[in-house]
Amino acid sequence: MTAQSTQAPAPLFKTLTDGETRVDIWFNGHSLSVPAERSVAAALLAAGVSRFRATPVSGAPRAPFCMMGACFECLVEIDGVPSRQSCMVPVRAGMHIRSQEGARDLPPEPGTNADTLEENAHAR
């Protein structure tokens, strides 16, 4: 039998230095000062945000998982554009980011009438 170590294991992630440049962004109407030169997901996580979106069916809270654009768990609305992968978008000063709640509808195509689209959908 081996003796157990009483020391805590080394952390898996190393925080970058605090001397970094910071930028101001907005998340759900609240101003945040976050490290620059990171993805939106990394910046929000560093600011203590733990809920990025809710699932369309159950409303369960979701947050970044893979941090490389494969899982789609970090979807948020950025500057009015829904369903953005926050781990793939660089943070920049003045961004307005909102949690994504449930499913998003696609906007109608430019030059089409929304009523015509609905009629065509029901005719099928």
Image (tube, helix red, strand yellow):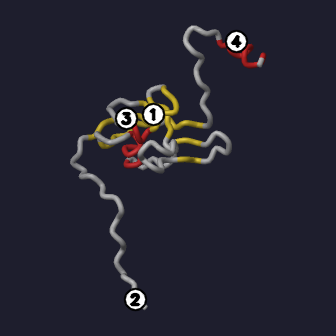
Label at residue 2: 2
Q: Are marks 4 and 2 in contact (CB under 8 Å)?
A: no
Tell me the quarter of the picture where residue 102 sits. Answer: top right
- Comparing labels 2 and 3, the label whose residue is closer to the camera: 2
Q: Which label belongs to residue 25?
A: 3
Dot 3 amino acid type: Ile
Disc assigned to residue 97: 1
Which one is earlier in the sequence, the residue at label 1 or at label 2? 2
| Number of other residues with Cα within 10 Å of mark 1, as a class: few under 14, some 14 to 19, many 20 or more | many
Q: Residue at x 78, y 16 (%)?
A: 123
Task: Please tell me whether residue 110 is drawn above or below residue 44 in the rendered image.
Answer: above
Q: Residue at x 44, y 42 (%)?
A: 69
Element marked by disc 4: helix
In the rendered view of the protein, which quadrant contains the C terminus? top right
- Check the image and name the residue furthest to the right: 123
- Identify the mark at residue 115; answer none if there is no mark: 4
Earlier along the polypeptide chain: callout 4 or callout 2? Answer: 2
Name which of mark 3 and mark 4 comes first in the sequence.
3
Question: As shown in the figure, which amino acid type bears the numbered disc 4?
Answer: Asp
User: 32 above or below 17?
Assistant: above
In percent of width and height, residue 9 lies at 36, 72
Dot in front, 1 or 4: 4
